[in-house]
Amino acid sequence: MTYRKAAEEQFRALFEATPHPVLVYDPGTLNILLANGAAEVAYGYRADELCRLTLDDIHPAEQRSALHRQIARSSQGKRYAGVWTHVAADGTRFDSEVTGNDVWLRGRRHRLALVHPVHDRRAAELAEQRRLQRANAQERALSELASDPRVSDGSDLHIVLRHICRTACEALEITRASVWRVREHPEALVCEALHDIRDDIPHAVPLVPATACRTYLDSLKRYRSMDVEDALSDHRTRELTDDYLAPAGIGALLDAGIRLHGRLHGVLCLEHAGGPRRWHHDEVRFAAQLADQITNAVIRAERNRQQQLLHLIASEVASGTGEDFFRLLVTRLGESLGATLVHIAETPEGRESDYASILAGWRRDGSRHDGHYPLAETPCRLALDEDTCMISHGVANVFPEDGVLAELGAEGYIGIRLRDSTGEPIGLLTAVFDRALEPGDESGSLMQIFAARAAAELERLRGETRLRLAAAVLENTGEGILIADGEGRIAESNPAFRRITGHDPAPLQGEDIMDVLTAGDPATVTGIRRGLFRAGHWEGEIQCPRADGGAFPAWASFSRLAGTDDDPPRLIAMVSDITELHESRAELRYLAHHDPLTRLPNRVSLREALDRALADRTTSGTEVAVLFIDLDGFKDVNDSLGHSEGDAVLQVVARRLIDYVHGDDLLARVGGDEFMLLVARHDARQRATALADSLLEALDAPFEAGGRPIYLTASVGIALAPEHGEDAESLILAADAAMYLAKNEGRNTVRTFQPELSHQAYHRIVTAGALRSAIDEERLFLAYQPVLALGSGEHYACEALVRWRRDDGSVVPPGEFIPVAEQSGLIVPISRWVFRQACRQMREWAETGNAPGRVAVNVSPAHLRAGNLIGDIHAALADTGIAPTQLIVEVTESTIMQAPETVSRTLETLRAMGVEIAVDDFGTGYSSLAYLKRLPLSILKLDKSFTQDLPDDLDNAAIARAILAMAASLGLRVVAEGIETEAQLAFLRTEGCELGQGFLFARPAEPAAPA
């Protein structure tokens, strides 16, 4: 006891002497038990006041859930550290780095928190640490959602949506999250779920009409997600400010579209209260992944709802017959679908009928609906003619002569033609709704399911003919059918059943139907008998025995038919062999983890295997290496020979590579021309480099494509654990970065990851994200440089050059962002935008009377390869009214030679439209002059590398003279680029160069009426 007392006294002395705030709290209740003097100063409370608070009281509301999880995850005796925001007594907030561990006082375990307030010099470092904390929280949240049974089974969509909203608030440390459904008629946003960490703020409005958020909705329909740093001033959300954002104090939005059936189904809205907030690309990706979770949840909920309705209705109407069946069916359909009216009608003359006779009708208001009605000028006429008619909205306006529709105020309509077993129309199943039918509405699918049963029942009621047809169906249907007496003894079987099971007819007579179909399995038999007892019907999957002793999966339907005085009760079983369905499901599971072209594992499989290898590394002592293999120049194979030939080459590549994979090594195809190899063994480091060299050697032999040999090389990047990353994502990124280094250093080589590569990769990612935002936020602009006639000085044209202005007003050099745009796939939308903007500017200049003769636009190689360049140019010209003769399309010499046949066809089409074609940077490529002669060119642009140092550089002078002479012989004009001195200008004039541009005349400038 003396030692413990001395230790506690020593602890208290150190506790008070510590210059930083120190708190001791109960990890179970979060009550603060002790606070030192530094804590009093930092928080503005006296020590006794602090001891009446909990940790929740000194943290902002948006961090409390994350704080609770952090404390709960910290096991006994384990230290933890993190960056948290604290709240002082006067309400001010300050960020602190907090370190926590266990401490024992008076024989009880408590938790000690050492608080280091963040100073300006560490703010950036800790902000990044804080971002990583949130990123980790997001990954955990996605993992937890994926394994949460509430999310996976989709039994209660509203619970799932609220759970996802709450998860988003916790992972992103935001104030509010909500899910909105896009209603189409009339268009509006309807709130489906909401979570707000504040108790004193009113909840969001339940509905926002589309007229109040048109720009916002249009943006979401165009892009997958929308990150808005300043929601109150951004043009996309300005309409929502007064009624939605400002009342709740929302300052920033991160919204992701929920797409279903190819349309915008809804929006996941993530909201930050207070001032603006810049969203990190990790957070944007997280929002999109949550939206995908919601999409899957909606699909599962729709499927569950349909199945529940199907089973509910089926169980109630299965044993019904005749008019009783029809009355029960329309009643249950009407109640389940939320319809206004449902009826089953007979059409005596089939498709030629002029009227329909209602066999059973149901109206929600309880009034009668029976008798005959004419088909002319009604949607039922369409249903009878077209098999199915679905009108989503405004049906009463479309058919104003239909008095019933007008009386009901009908909006939606579904009509399904009932056909007999020969396919002839015999009636209609119709439902009318006083609401619009949204895309994906399952009402029609559910009605289709019961339409067949209704048609069969209607056919039965037609008398003896139906009995003869039923016998024919029994003999010819593809489903196996057994008919048993009331005791379950088999009386008859159809040929399909005997074919499916291999039984002979005689031995089946008198056998117990349950034994024949289930081999007497107790659980299955009990379930079937319970369903028959309760509802007279049961259906489900069984293992059906074959006569040879085997078994197969089957879908079985049992129905008990009630007997009459003249007809004893019957038990009918229908059996369908679903072996192919099971095989299809197995194939789908296989395809989910394998590449369908090469049959190699895909990225999902590799990621799972890599996660397992990293988890096992510490216990098994194995080494882990990842090789990223990218085929060099494979795009040229697809462009020149077509994708079918390219696919064939990829299959051969896969077979060659797999020959070098042994043991537990895993080769996966992870992209179009990208493969990854996982090596997890005790000698992985040593084997990785040797294996990479072997893989390159495997590609040395030529490949056969298009009837001729082609040669391929590859660039390989290697990353090792743990020095290049301790988790799968880090290792993959490291291997990817090393592969890019191999490409940059000449291709057909192997490089191992170096730490500085991660910074380069990060820079590419950040630049691509910022560029994407710049495109969305319209921060790109065009600068124009005039092209002058060197003889007269007249303005011949101007060249449009794309530029990017940052938020701070600085301009990003094209050489910094154009390569990133090409790598990230953004160059095509940028190129498309440049064409539209340049044509608009020409129209504005024309309206002022100061337009140059033409505008020249550079086309990217990717835009040429995309195959839609002609359509994009045509649209830009049509939208602005600019004549094709006012446009010059500039194509680099190297682009022409990459895919000469494709480029030639495109240029021929543009020239036929009247567009002028210019070859940019002429003289720097390797084009054939004979080939250039066949192209529809108007202009050659002499590269500035040949105009510099003129006329003193004799080599450049000779090249310039040769190009000018060649152009003259081909009838082409020449534009000399980069003219900066009077001496250069004089030389070019003397040698007969017609046109030129350069700093001597004007630098590229933003739009203005050209001189």
Image: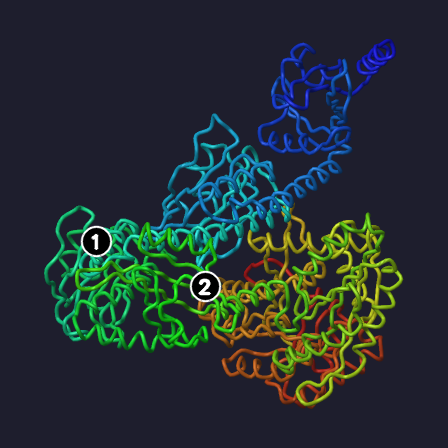
In this rendering, which labeled residue sits more in front, label 1 or label 2? 1
Label 1: few (<14), some (14–19) or many (≥20) C-alpha neighbours in 10 Å:
many
Q: Nearer the viewer, residue 389 or 539?
A: 539
Amino acid type shown at disc 2: Glu
Spot occupied by residue 935 in the image (x, y as percentages of width and height): 62, 86
In this rendering, position of residue 630 left or right of residue 528: right
Q: Residue at x 68, y 69 (%)?
A: 600
Examine the rendered structure and indicate whether residue 905 appears above or below residue 22: below
Q: Residue at x 27, y 49 (%)?
A: 335
Q: CA distance from mark 1 to mark 2?
A: 60 Å
Amino acid type shown at disc 1: Leu
Spot occupied by residue 22 in the image (x, y as percentages of width and height): 75, 20
In this rendering, position of residue 3 left or right of residue 71: right
Q: Earlier in the sequence, mark 1 or mark 2?
A: 1
Q: Nearer the viewer, residue 361 or 534?
A: 534
Spot occupied by residue 215 in the image (x, y as percentages of width and height): 44, 50
Question: In the structure shown, which secondary structural element does the residue marked by tag 2 occupy?
Answer: helix
Label 2: few (<14), some (14–19) or many (≥20) C-alpha neighbours in 10 Å:
few
- Report whether residue 166 is seen: yes
- Quadrant into which the N terminus falls: top right
The quadrant in which residue 983 appears is bottom right
Spot occupied by residue 370 in the image (x, y as percentages of width and height): 12, 57
Residue under pointer 2: 847
The quadrant in which residue 413 appears is bottom left
Examine the rendered structure and indicate whether residue 949 appears above or below residue 449: below
- Quadrant into which the C terminus falls: bottom right
Residue under pointer 1: 341
- Report whether residue 795 is seen: no
Examine the rendered structure and indicate whether residue 999 appears above or below residue 283: below
